[in-house]
Each structure stands twice: as structure tokens, then as C-alpha cells.
Amino acid sequence: MSKAKPCLGYTDCKTVKLDLDNMSYSDVQEIVTSTMNRFNLKGRLILKSSKNCYHAVFDQYVSWAENVAIMSWVALVLLRKNPKVVKWFLMQCIKGSSTLRVTPKKDKPAPRIVAKFGDQSHAIANFLKERERIKKIYNQIIV
Amino acid sequence: MNYLPKYISKKERIEEIRTYVNQGYSANKIQKKLQSQGLGIQRKRLLAEVRRIKGKPSRTNTFKYTPTKYRQKRRPTFPRRSGWGSWGGKSVAVYLAVKTRRHPKPYNARYEFHGSGKDLNGAIRIAFSGIVPPHEQPFVQCSARNFVNNPYLYGEKGVWLGRPNVES
């Protein structure tokens, strides 16, 4: 077995996900709320991945084209001066699907839920279910 | 004296091959007959033509029909992604910087597995045990079951490094 463990993440095309780095929680809330209202995404879930780094997941399923439109609006219009978010957005476009980390990464712990708002029954419920599944597999392997 | 080569139509050559095939000649014998008439043809094409005349399917599995001593000389080929967003469903990403014996310089690599929980569990276990995507194809999207059945088709032995320089 190699010493370092790779990270595990959840990937799909239809769920709107955002990786918001280098910003405070109030900024994250503002951005996530404005995105949800603008694109009618019904519900939101915010996770804290590390200090000043947050993940956001929205409840409405969308096509990959719509997903890219939403991510680009956030990364290139709202946060164009944040190179980490722009880099993350470009990486997702190159891959053709968006990914959020689920397991710990070296010195960073696994992302934990800090806020929920609105409908949680569709994409968010699926995301949480898959997150639990990935965590379970990871824990089995590590132990 | 005419130094220009004799023009041979494709139809003429095929007619010749057809007559020899009907007589039951082997490919080598047909080739010798054709060469004596100045109608020589590449062996690969001749075999394909003979198969077509006999109504047999063309052999697609070239690896199976390659002698074992030549098989090892083949360069390793890794499956390519079928296209952008080729897998539209949900999957599990396994990613970090890696290094292999062939490429000691670290590079970013990523697996994206899709499939049932059991297959995912097996695939992630195998990836964790030190199978990493090759440098030629550092981003591999594949079915977890296919990966479990044949991990060396999708990767090679290597080390996952703790260097957190990969964007999720």
C-alpha cells in the first residue's frame, strides 16, 4: 500500500456545485443566495471544507450546458478577481463534469455541513446519499 | 523500350486472385503466381481479399493472431476517453498527484469510476493499493467493474503522493 491516500470526490453533470475558496462565510451566503434566486435553483446546501473555503450544492437538476452557464456566471462575473474559483471552474469545463471533495485531503478535514435552506429533496438528497456512500467506502479502506 | 510499369487494374488483380482461390491455392502460392505475372500485392491485402472472396469475416482481433514473441514488443495502449461528458451520470473521483517508475516526476492524475457500490468499493481499493493512471492518459473515466476486472488496462503501478496540488 502506498503511504498517501488519494482524495475521493463526488462527480456528476446535473447537480449545480460550487467550490468557493478564499472568502468569508457572509460572502459565500450572499453569492449562493443570489445564484439560487437568479437561476431558480430551489434549495441550497453549504459545506465548510477548510478555513475560508466552502462548497455549495443546489437542489435543482440542470443540464450540463445550464450548469456551465451558472458556474461561469459565479466564477467569471461575481468572482472574476478570485483566481482559485476561476481555476476550479476552468478545470470542471475541461473535465466535462463538476466534482466536489468528500474525504479528507492531507491537512484538510472532510467537508462538513454548515447551512441548509429551501428544498432538499432532489439533487441535495442525492448528493448527501452519495457522500455517505463514498465516506463509508473510504472508512472501510482506511480502517 | 517501355520502362513504365504495366498498369494493373484492381478488377484484373481480383479476378486473378478469385481464380486461384477457387482452385484451392494457399495464400503463399497465390502470391507467387501473381508475382510471376507482375501482379504482386501486399500480403495483408491479399489475405483480406482471400477472406472476402471466401466470405469469411475479417479478423479484428490482431493481438490474438500476433505471435507471442512479438506481442511483448507492442507499446502499451491505454483506453481513451470517448468524448466530452461521455459519462453523464454520477461517479466517484479518485485524484491526487502521482509518480510512477516510468515517470518519476510527479503529475496530476484522476480516475472517475461509475457503477454499483460493490464495484466502486473494489475499484477504489485497487486504486488505493497503488494503481495510478498512466502519464499518457492521466484522466481516466471508466466503469468500476471494468477497472476491477482489468486494472492494468487503465493504469500502472505507481505511488499516490501527498502533495495537494490538484483542484477538485
Image (cartoon, rainbow, N blue to C red):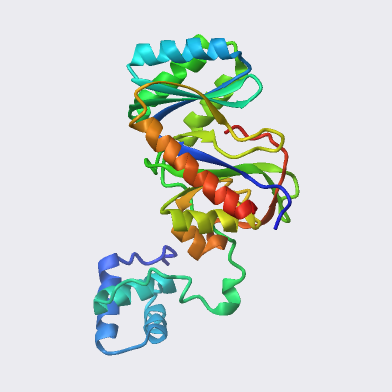
Q: Nearer the viewer, residue B90 or A28?
A: A28
Can residue A97 be seen from the camera position used here?
Answer: yes
Q: Nearer the viewer, residue A97 or B15?
A: A97
Identify the residue shown where x is 42% and y is 70%. B61
Numbered label tally: 0
Can residue A14 be seen from the camera position used here?
Answer: no
Q: Nearer the viewer, residue A108 or B48?
A: A108
Identify the residue shown where x is 58% and y is 48%. A138
- x and y percentages locating residue A34 in the rendered image: 42, 10
- x and y percentages locating residue A142 in the rendered image: 64, 52
Left or right of A58: which side holds B14?
left
Left or right of B96: which side holds B83?
left
Q: Quadrant of the C terminus of chain B?
A: top right
Residue B27 higher or lower than B83, as above or below = below
Residue closest to the far bottom? B24
- x and y percentages locating residue B153 in the rendered image: 53, 60
Residue B166 higher or lower than A77, as above or below = below
Quadrant position of residue A112: top right
Quadrant position of residue B95: top right
- x and y percentages locating residue B52 in the rendered image: 27, 73
Identify the residue shown where x is 72% and y is 34%. A107
Quadrant position of residue B152: bottom right
Identify the residue shown where x is 55% and y is 37%. A102
Q: Quadrant of the N terminus of chain B?
A: bottom left
Left or right of A54: which side holds A125?
left
